[in-house]
């Protein structure tokens, strides 16, 4: 364990990574200050040095992960014209699920204070699930201009259907294990002529 009073570099990142491991192993019910700090091998007070309370910690974890997701999918429209359209879409949509996405979502919705804080941050413009939807729509529009997606395709609605379906899988974590196969099937159904 880190000695008391010694600065821990990247404490937030260390606590977030520890929380993901706890969530993957024990689910939202196992997420406590103690379980996170023990997993991170640091003093129990460290979490409260960086966050107001456990709800704030969970909210910041969710917001951090969505910021990473948004950054990862943002370049998707620049891939227009390269690779397979369906694979590009499926790969981008699956970023939302990630390896720990479902358990992080479960933690957020299981804590009312965290859920409210996340919602308010999204309303204020923090990246959220809509970042994936926007990237998917822009990508489809770019492919449409190149003729790789039909001229009659409603790109915004295709993006909404795909992002919404992945969000559904995210919120119902027990189906997330089948996520990659389901997302690929959905993309094939949404874009049969591609």
Image: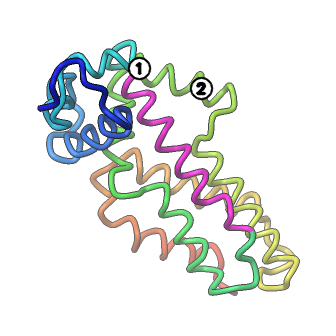
Q: Secondary structure at mark 1?
A: helix
Looking at the magenta stretch, what is its main secondary structure? helix
Q: Residue at x 75, y 71 (%)?
A: 78
Q: Relative to 15, is 168 above or below? A: below
Q: Residue at x 62, y 40 (%)?
A: 127
The residue wearing badge 1 is 56
Which image quarter holds the C terminus? bottom right
Residue 179 rendering spot, x and y as whole percentages = 39, 64
- In front: 12, or 106? 12
Distance CA(mark 2)–CA(mark 1):
12 Å
Residue 185 rendering spot, x and y as whole percentages = 48, 76
The residue wearing badge 2 is 121
Label 1 Cα neighbours within 10 Å, binned few <14 / some 14-19 / many ≥20: some
In the image, the segment drawn in magenta is: 56-77
Q: Relative to 194, is 182 above or below? A: above
Residue 68 rendering spot, x and y as whole percentages = 53, 49
Which image quarter holds the N terminus? top left
Q: Is residue 37 left or right of residue 126?
A: left
User: Residue 18: which quarter of the image?
Assistant: top left
Q: Residue at x 39, y 12 (%)?
A: 52
Q: Is residue 154 left or right of residue 46?
A: right
Q: Secondary structure at mark 2?
A: helix
């Amino acid at each position: 364990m880190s000695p008391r009073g010694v600065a821990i570099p990247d404490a937030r990142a260390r606590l977030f990574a520890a929380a993901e491991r706890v969530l993957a192993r024990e689910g939202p019910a196992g997420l406590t200050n103690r379980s996170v700090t023990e997993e991170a091998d640091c003093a129990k007070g460290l979490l409260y040095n960086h966050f107001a309370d456990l709800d704030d910690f969970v909210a910041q974890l969710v917001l951090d992960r969505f910021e990473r997701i948004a950054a990862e999918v943002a370049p998707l429209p620049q891939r227009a014209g390269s690779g397979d359209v369906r694979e590009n879409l499926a790969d981008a949509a699956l970023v939302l699920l990630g390896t720990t996405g479902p358990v992080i979502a479960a933690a957020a919705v299981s804590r009312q204070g965290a859920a409210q804080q996340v919602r308010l941050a999204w309303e204020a413009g923090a990246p959220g699930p809509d970042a994936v939807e926007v990237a998917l729509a822009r990508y489809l529009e770019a492919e449409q201009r190149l003729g790789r997606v039909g001229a009659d395709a409603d790109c915004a609605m295709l993006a909404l259907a795909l992002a919404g379906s992945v969000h559904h899988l995210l919120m119902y974590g027990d189906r997330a294990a089948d996520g990659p196969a389901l997302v690929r099937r959905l993309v094939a159904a949404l874009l049969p002529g591609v």
